[in-house]
Image (cartoon, rainbow, N blue to C red):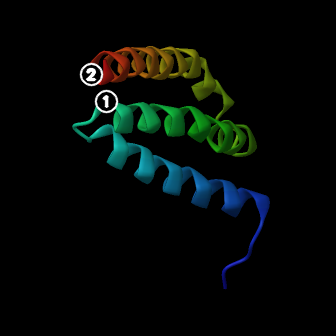
Amino acid sequence: MFELSIFNFAQISNEILALIGTFLLTSVKAKSRMYGFMIFLLCNIPTVYLLLVSELWWILATLPVWFFLSLRGLINNYKEAISVKA
């Protein structure tokens, strides 16, 4: 039977956020892609919890790289959205 726990909630929220983020990142509009990058930044919260609980903390060494790439994409898409609007 399905049991609602913090671990299961983190798994479900991680998968839902990743699905929505991927959907938005494949958009043609820069503003939609920007929201996709923002969702992926939020997706790091349950991911970090899952990696710590499942004792895969050593994978967190790659998290700064993914965080940097998400921030860089967010900034670039923001600049593109502003230039398209003007």
Q: Where is residue 69 in the image (x, y as percent from the top left)?
A: 44, 17
Question: Could you tell me which secondary element the residue under label 1 belongs to?
Answer: helix
Mark 1 crowd level (few <14, some 14–19, many ≥20, 10 Å Cα): many
Q: Where is residue 83 in the image (x, y as percent from the top left)?
A: 30, 15
Mark 1 vs mark 2: in front: 2
Q: For the N terminus, which image quadrant?
A: bottom right
Residue at 57% over, 16% down = 64
Q: Where is residue 30 in the image (x, y as percent from the top left)?
A: 31, 30
Mark 2: amino acid: Val
Mark 1: amino acid: Ala
Q: Distance between the residues labelled 1 and 2?
A: 8 Å
Q: In the rendered structure, which disc, 1 or 2, sits on the residue that comes first in sequence?
A: 1
Asked if residue 72 is positioned above or below residue 47 in the image, the reply reads: above
Depth check: give the residue in front, 44 or 53: 44
Marks 1 & 2, CB-CB < 8 Å contact? yes
Q: Position of residue 71 (x, y in %)?
A: 50, 18
Q: Which of the numbered marks, if any, corresponds to residue 30?
A: 1
